[in-house]
Image: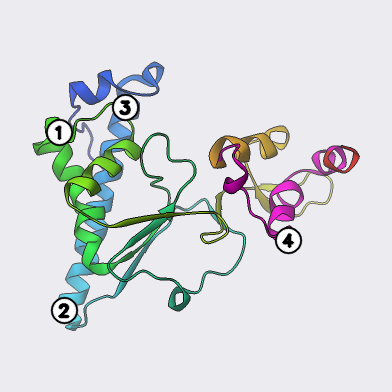
Amino acid sequence: GPQLERPYIELSYLQASDKPWLGKARIESHVRQWWSLLRCWKHFIHLACKRQAPYQTFVKLRDDAFLLAPIILKNMNIQDLIVLPECGNFAGYNDKWAFLDATLGRAYFAMPVFEYYTNYSSLNMHKGNPENLLKRVLIKHQAPVSAVSVDILPILTSRFRTNEISGQTFPQNITPASCFLFDQLKLGKEPHCWPSDCDRRRAIYCDRCTVKRQEWLRDH
């Protein structure tokens, strides 16, 4: 749907921004993001009512999600729970992807924008970013959360780029030189933030990097 032209900017959120150099534009982007989540949730609630068949599970992914392995929903414990990544949380809850019981959809999809507009001061925010706001909102609404490792939720942030040598298109982050370092930034440097499975590690260290980067990893 159409985006808000001038989203409301909560001054306290702006002042607490973790990236103040990006100014109001970053805050406006966050608000548009929350409005989009609300519209998405309302759309699926409308479909459920129309079909008289309520959903059991919601899955929230970004368009740059790269799955390192298949995720089988029936094998995941999602009942009465929101499952999301434990790493890359930036002092809150990682908001890039989530698997949740549909009964918790209101708290996850609708309440961030509602609380931002109507009850922001009650959230006791210390850092102005979507991750912190999501955590404060879910705690306030008593939504059970399970933050899991990348072994359980094997998804990374990625971009697609054409290899200049082979002409093949493959997932890759931002620029050729920053593929590996960008993953470290997003996942975190702690060992538990990295996949333990060898094939999944290969997808990080090699498959999404240029030939030059692969050669560097091989030699080091």
Whether pointer 4 and pointer 2 mark residues with C-beta atoms closer than 8 Å, the reply is no
**Could you tell me how far apart the alpha carbons at marks 4 and 1 are, in whole angstroms?**
44 Å
**Could you tell me how far apart the alpha carbons at marks 2 and 3 are, in whole angstroms?**
40 Å
**Could you tell me how far apart the alpha carbons at marks 3 and 1 are, in whole angstroms?**
13 Å
Whether pointer 4 and pointer 1 mark residues with C-beta atoms closer than 8 Å, the reply is no
* Residue at figure coordinates x 51%, y 59% from the top left: 153
- Assess disc 2: are there few (<14), some (14-19) or many (≥20) residues with their C-alpha within 10 Å of its C-alpha: few
- What number is the disc on residue 127? 3
Mark 2 or 1, which is nearer the eye?
1
Q: Which residue is mark 1?
A: 120
Counting residues from the start of the chain, the first of labels 3 and 1 encountered is: 1
Amino acid type, mark 3? Lys
Amino acid type, mark 2? Lys
Counting residues from the start of the chain, the first of labels 2 and 1 encountered is: 2
**Of 169 and 207, the residue lying toward us:** 207
* Residue at figure coordinates x 24%, y 26% from the top left: 13
Extent of the magenta region: 188-216
Label 2 SS: helix
Q: Is residue 74 above or below residue 41?
A: below
- Assess disc 1: are there few (<14), some (14-19) or many (≥20) residues with their C-alpha within 10 Å of its C-alpha: some
Q: Which residue is mark 4?
A: 199
Residue 207 is a magenta residue: yes
Q: Position of residue 198 (x, y in %)?
A: 74, 58
> Viewed as shown, does residue 149 lie left or right of 175?
left
- Assess disc 4: are there few (<14), some (14-19) or many (≥20) residues with their C-alpha within 10 Å of its C-alpha: few
Amino acid type, mark 4? Asp
Q: Main secondary structure of the magenta part?
A: helix
Counting residues from the start of the chain, the first of labels 4 and 2 encountered is: 2
Q: Which residue is mark 2?
A: 50
